[in-house]
Structures are given as structure tokens and as C-alpha cells.
Amino acid sequence: MMEFGGLRSSFDCLLIDLDDTLYSSSLGIAQACKRNIEEFLAAKCGVSAEKACSLRVELFRSYGSSLAGLIALGYDVHPDEYHSFVHGLLPYERISPDPQLRELLLSIPQAKIMFTNSDRKHVKRVLEGLGIEEECFDRIVCFETLNPHLFDTKEESSTLPRPPATPEVILKPSITAVETAVRLAGFDPRRALFLDDSERNIAAGKAVGLRTALVGKRVKTKAADYSLESIMNLSQAIPEIWGEKEKKKGTLDDGLAVRSELDSVRSTTPIEA
């Protein structure tokens, strides 16, 4: 058990989501993102705005994200093109500096890994809006980290046929994505705490063996060890992050993966980016 200032903590590492976790969903960033996705689909697929809306839902249900669906269906779309439109036009001005959040993050003694499906530029803009330095985190695991195979820099002739195997987009809540983040964090998943606003992502984290905290919800799900209405309630909801004098019995499960949760986890994620 790791000790901080003579107190013992149940956790050695925290994996923390970005969107709708570090800031409130009430800002409407996710809704704006959905609208941008639909505009992108309308232009890329040559469909009406009404059709683009239903297409976004269809791709989400079938592939876990619009980008994953477009790539799987053979559309010529690069992640940078997609993200520059879907994220590039977001109302970032709605995100204001949050010194209390910054203070909270800096007070956490364990290693802090940001684990997000969003691309690197989006991460940078959100953190800048919140007034939080990237150095508040020990590592950032984002879209590019999870999908290096989609960013092959080798020049290829345009006359070459497309590879028969369509590259997979790896994102939460796929088990592969969570396992990748755990491996990069370098800590025992049973002693790592995963904070996310998505119930499906939380289920994936539990299946891999992480301790889990569902953010933005009042009621815990089966896969969540904790629930908190806001990230700012972290110290009240999970005080053991900062250490406890004596280990309390029965407060958490043994950290083993809940295999039944695997049935509710898709191979790809509900990306809104």
C-alpha cells in the first residue's frame, strides 16, 4: 500500500477522463460536437441534414463512433480531417478557467493519467480553457496514443490498392483501449482508480480490473465502485485517495474484473469527437 505523508492510500494511480468529467456537461460541448459530426457526415457522404442525423446514430450503434464507421465502410477520411472539423468548430469559449479544479488535481499525490478518446489538439484547447497545465498530468493517453496505426507517415503511391483489412479505430469502451491505458500507466489495475462519465467506459474499466468512479451521476451502476455528481466532490466521495490511517474493511471489492460487464462493452467507443 502506497504511503503519502505517513498515511496509506488504496490507490497508486488515477486514470481520469476529460470531456464531461473535468468540466460539466451543462456547457453543451457534447451537443455542439454532435451537430458538428452531422455536418461532417452530410458533406462527406453527400446526404441531407436529416439523413446525417440518423446516419450518426446508425454509425454510433453499429461501430461505436462516426469516425470508426466511416473508416469501416471504406470512406477516405483521415482522423485529422475529421477532428479538425468536429472539434475545431467547438465553442471552446464556454470553458472557463477553474482554479479550484487545478488545485484539486495538484493535491492528488498519486500519478495522474488523462485517458480520453479525444485528439491531442482538443485536449490542449480544453486544458487551456480550464487554466490547467498539461504538466498536472503525468501522461496523456488520447486518440493518437491509442491509434498510432492510423498515422502512418510513410509515403505511399496513390496508385496502390487500399489494404484489404480496414484499420480498426481503438477507443473506449473497448477492452483493448483500457488495457492499453493501464499498460502505459504502468500500475496494477487493482490499485488504479478510473474516473469517467460514461457508464459503458466504467463497465470496461471494471472488466479489466480497475477501481471505478462514475462522474456526473448520483447513483452508482453495477460496475461503479463510486459515483460523484461532480469531479469537485472527489475529496468527499473518495477521501482515501489522500490516504487513510487505517484500512477500512468492506469499503471496496477485491478489484477483480466483473466478467458479466463484458457483455455490455462494445468493441469500440461512443466517441463524440
Image (spheres, rainbow, N blue to C red):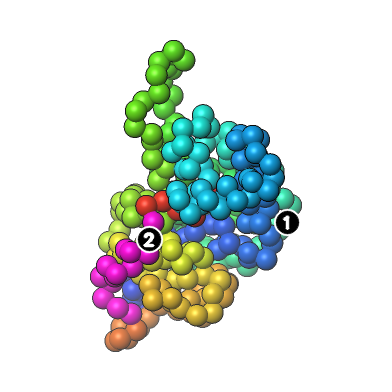
Residue 160 inside the magenta-drawn segment: no
In this view, the residue in front, 105 or 96, is 96
For disc 1, the neighbor class at 10 Å (few under 14, some 14 to 19, many from 20) is few
Q: Is residue 163 left or right of residue 105?
A: left
Magenta region: which residues? 252-266
Q: Residue at x 31, y 83 (%)?
A: 247
Residue 205 visible in this rendered orientation of the protein: no
In the picture provided, is 110 more to the left or to the right than 209?
A: right
Residue depicted at 60% across the width and 65% down the height: 101
**Residue placed most toward the observer, 247 or 18:** 18
* Residue 256 lies in quadrant: bottom left
Pointer 2 local density, CA inside 10 Å: few below 14, some 14–19, many at least 20:
many
Looking at this view, is 37 or 7 the one in front?
Answer: 37
The residue under label 2 is 265
Residue 230 appearing in the image: yes
Label 1 to label 2: alpha-carbon separation: 32 Å
Mark number displayed over residue 94: 1
Image coordinates of residue 133 in percent, x first then y, are: 58, 51
201 versus 149 height, above or below: below
